Image (tube, rainbow, N blue to C red):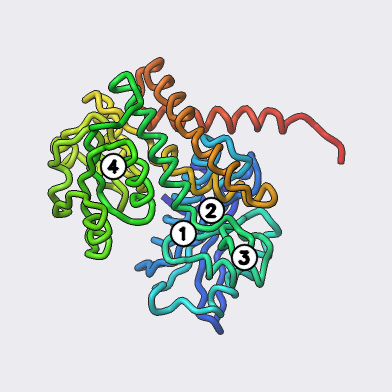
Amino acid sequence: MEILEQMGTEGHEQLVMVSDADSGLKAIISIHDTTLGPACGGTRIWPYKSEQEAVWDALRLSRAMTYKSAAADLPLGGGKGVIIADSHTEKTEALVRAYGRFVDTLAGRYLTTTDVGTTGRDMEYVKQETDHVVGLPTSAGGSGDTSIMTGLGLYMGMKACAKEVWGADFLTGKTVAIQGFGKVAYHTAHHLMKEDAKLVVTDVFDGALDKARELGLKVVKPNEIYDVDCDIFAPCALGGVITPDTIPRLKCQVVAGGANNQLLAESDGEELHRLGIVYGPDYILNSGGIINVESEIAGEYNPDRAREKTERIYEIMDRVIAISKNEDIPTAKAADRLAEDRLKSVRRIRQVYRSN
């Protein structure tokens, strides 16, 4: 599918390609939908193999941000920025600030924040070139580390799924197999441990496993995590891990994790539904980060407000489950329905003429 054809099919509004020879910047900014408000989404620095791959990633991720914000009842649209570079060897102050200048040219249609390969310090560099940036460190007046609220939101989503499966949202004694033990999983684990849940963890990085062992958690090899006899399987690393090959290995009643794009294909969500495994759609459960950022956009950052809104993920997941049951559709499709219905309702309101 050609780029403009895909943009039209999926409702993308704008695709911006930018370059700065002096800093070595090569970047793409995708704005998917601004029905609900300015497009908001992180900037990812990644060594894409081609410009085409970077474009497709920006388009895919910006669309996902639209759905995430819509389902979370936020006044934000979906956008994403990608910089073609290796964040470990090619990221410089000049490159990041050059990117910030291009963000500024969009005049607030796109608000950027952190993502893979970018940090709060990078956002401080961006801030020197534009006001259209969020996710700054708390020391700079921002909302700080988004993984704290993302971890809380994932935990609340797990509880909603638990209520559907076991009739109560208590996780005491439940076994949770966590694939990937980064910052989000670390914060979720602390909530689970307070409820005396049993955790089994894996990661490809020794440092992450060391943290798990320090908490007294059981550790298994990466490929063994699918075979753990558990109640909840929590993908918290890479996407595309729920596949025709891995689903038969799962010994759980709930799949609920913090990773993006967990389903390799739509058919995998349908298969979980057929098997009676409750799936917590990723962009519902991991929306705590964007909720945290939105609390910064709304004015002076209030952590209590951010926490309160993040805890509502429980209610949102409840609504997704209700749609799934009423229409006998997978929860992934039910989540899309929830987001799309909100977008449609606001579009109808915007059709009413107002003079300026």
User: Residue 269: where, in percent of width, then height?
Assistant: 30, 33
Q: Quadrant of residue 221?
A: bottom left
Whether residue 295 is visible, yes or no, is: yes
Badge 1 amino acid: Asp
* Residue at which label 4 appears: 234
Badge 4 amino acid: Ala
* Residue at which label 1 appears: 115
Q: Check disc 3 and report its element: helix, strand or loop.
A: helix
Q: How far apart are the alpha carbons under marks 2 and 3?
A: 20 Å
User: Residue 196: where, in percent of width, then height?
Assistant: 28, 37
Q: Quadrant of residue 353?
A: top right
* Residue at which label 2 appears: 41
> Of the residues under marks 2 and 1, which one precedes in the sequence?
2
Q: How far apart are the alpha carbons under marks 2 and 4?
A: 23 Å
Badge 3 amino acid: Ala
Q: Which mark is in front, 3 or 4?
A: 3
* Residue at which label 3 appears: 140
Q: Check disc 1 and report its element: helix, strand or loop.
A: loop
